[in-house]
Image (cartoon, rainbow, N blue to C red):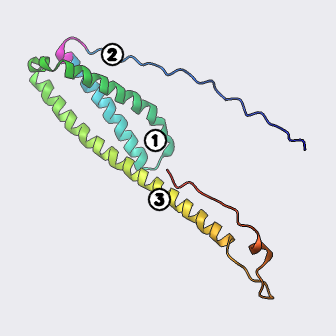
Amino acid sequence: MNYNRQQPPAPEKPAQPQQIIQFRTLSKDTNTALREVASTINKMSKVFVEETDALNKTDRNAFIALQEQKLLTAQEYQSDMGQMIGRKNELTSADPAMKERLKKMQADFAEISSKNLEALSRMQRCTEKLGNTIRNAAIHAAQKQNGYSYGENGAISNAAKRKAISSGLSETV
């Protein structure tokens, strides 16, 4: 027998090395640094609001388009917060109005984050339900095909005598 061996397809794109992103160093002046942190919190809040809106509208394209921006903004937020934690002693000398503004922003951000998390959880539950529905439909279709069918003479038809074919499905997500 002569089998034609096919070569596996070449990868479409060569793997690119992971980029290392350098985030800004916050200003030395505490109040300026706090304004920079406030700007990052605003950016992060905006991304979360847009993502929540996309999820609520079931706009898959908008949701996917936001993911890279969300990742970068979250990393910037983490960088800023890490720097401010390292400078916590300086916060005592910061402008009280600025500190109050940041406290309010953090409270608002926590609420926005909570709504975003709820929308993400809802999407995850819907995706799981859809997967279960598809899996159950496939199982029922396979069971119908494997049912016995009797002919006019009372004998099992040829189709039912054939060896069953496994149609196993992965039930993992």
Mark 3 residue element: helix
Label 3 vs label 1, nearer the camera:
3
Measured as percent of width and height from the top left, residue 99 is found at 14, 26
- Sequence order check, earlier mark of 3 and 1: 1
Nearer to me, 4 or 90: 4
Residue type beneath disc 3: Lys
- Sequence order check, earlier mark of 1 and 2: 2
Measured as percent of width and height from the top left, residue 96 is found at 9, 24
Nearer to me, 38 or 158: 158
Mark 1 residue element: helix
Q: Is residue 28 above or below residue 83?
A: above
Badges 3 and 1: C-beta atoms under 8 Å apart?
A: no
Measured as percent of width and height from the top left, residue 58 is found at 46, 50
Measured as percent of width and height from the top left, residue 134 is found at 56, 60
Residue 101 is labelled as none
> What residue sits 37% from the left and 35% below the top?
47
Alpha carbon separation for disc pair 3 and 2: 43 Å
Q: Residue furthest bottom?
A: 153
- Which residues are the magenta region? 27-32
Q: Residue furthest top?
A: 28
Q: Quadrant of the N terminus?
A: top right
**Which residue in the protein does label 3 denote?**
129
> What residue sits 28% from the left and 30% below the top?
41
Residue type beneath disc 1: Phe
Q: How many marks?
A: 3
Residue 63 is labelled as 1
Badges 3 and 2: C-beta atoms under 8 Å apart?
A: no
- Sequence order check, earlier mark of 3 and 2: 2
Mark 2 residue element: loop
In the rendered image, residue 49 lying in the magenta stretch gets the answer: no
Q: In which image quadrant can residue 51 be found? A: top left
**Which residue in the protein does label 2 denote?**
24
